[in-house]
Amino acid sequence: MQIEPRFFEDFVVGQTFHSGTKEITAERIKSFAAEFDPQPFHLDEDAAKDSLFGGLAASGWHTAAVTMRLLVDSDLKVAGGTIGAGGEDLRWLRPVRPGDVLRIEAEVTEVRPSRSRPELGIVKIRLTTLNQRGEAVQISSPSLMVRRRPATTI
């Protein structure tokens, strides 16, 4: 089923949105880390055993990237695309491990017109990334720039 893109006027505080799932593999953890966060606990199982994590763990930035993909593919379809205007409170609550299956839940927490760009509104969401056990692994509060519905002429 195709979801129609949502304009600013379609969002209300308390609305929730959900995504499908994405399994995290050891290979992807290592590949992402090799390019963007090359630390031993993201690259090598043996080295990771002696780390604070006690085993291989995805980079928080890997988790954030997967979260973004899940958000784009979720039922929160924003007219013109999901464009961030910043965010607050990015927290990684527990490690993401090989075999974890992630999904997101997003709740609209604020809806307000843009003060500087009348063609846009700001929609703030609380974005929670959960593993297969329903445990939050990442929480953030991004603000999205959302197009206002174009005026219709009769």
Image (cartoon, helix red, strand yellow):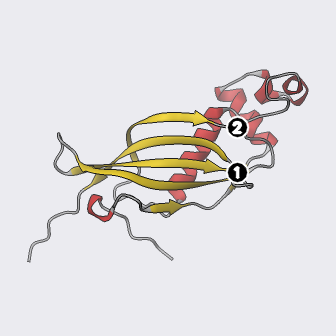
Find numbered disc 1 in the image and state the secondary structure of the residue it sits on: loop
Q: Residues within 10 Å of mark 2 (few under 14, many from 20)?
A: some
Under mark 1, the amino acid is Asn
Under mark 2, the amino acid is Arg
Residue 34: image tag:
none
Image-quadrant location for residue 84: top left
Towards the viewer: 15 or 68 = 15
Label whose residue precedes the other's in the sequence (1 or 2)? 2
The correct choice, above or below, for 11 with respect to 82 in the image is: below
Apparent side of residue 109 relative to residue 137 in the rendered image (left or right) = left
Towards the viewer: 108 or 7 = 108
Image-quadrant location for residue 78: bottom left
Find numbered disc 2 in the image and state the secondary structure of the residue it sits on: loop
Residue 94: image tag:
2
Apparent side of residue 109 relative to residue 63 in the rendered image (left or right) = left
The correct choice, above or below, for 56 with respect to 6 in the image is: above
Whole-Å distance between the Cαs marked 1 and 2?
10 Å
Which residue, given by chain and number where applicable, does mark 1 sit on?
Answer: 131
| Residue found 60% across the figure and 48% down from its top | 129
Apparent side of residue 145 relative to residue 62 in the rendered image (left or right) = left
Q: Residues within 10 Å of mark 1 (few under 14, many from 20)?
A: many
Q: Residue furthest right?
A: 46
Q: Does the CB distance between marks 1 and 2 fall below 8 Å?
A: yes
Image-quadrant location for residue 153: bottom left
Q: Position of residue 101 (x, y in %)?
A: 73, 53
Q: Position of residue 64 (x, y in %)?
A: 58, 39
Q: Position of residue 32 (x, y in %)?
A: 69, 34
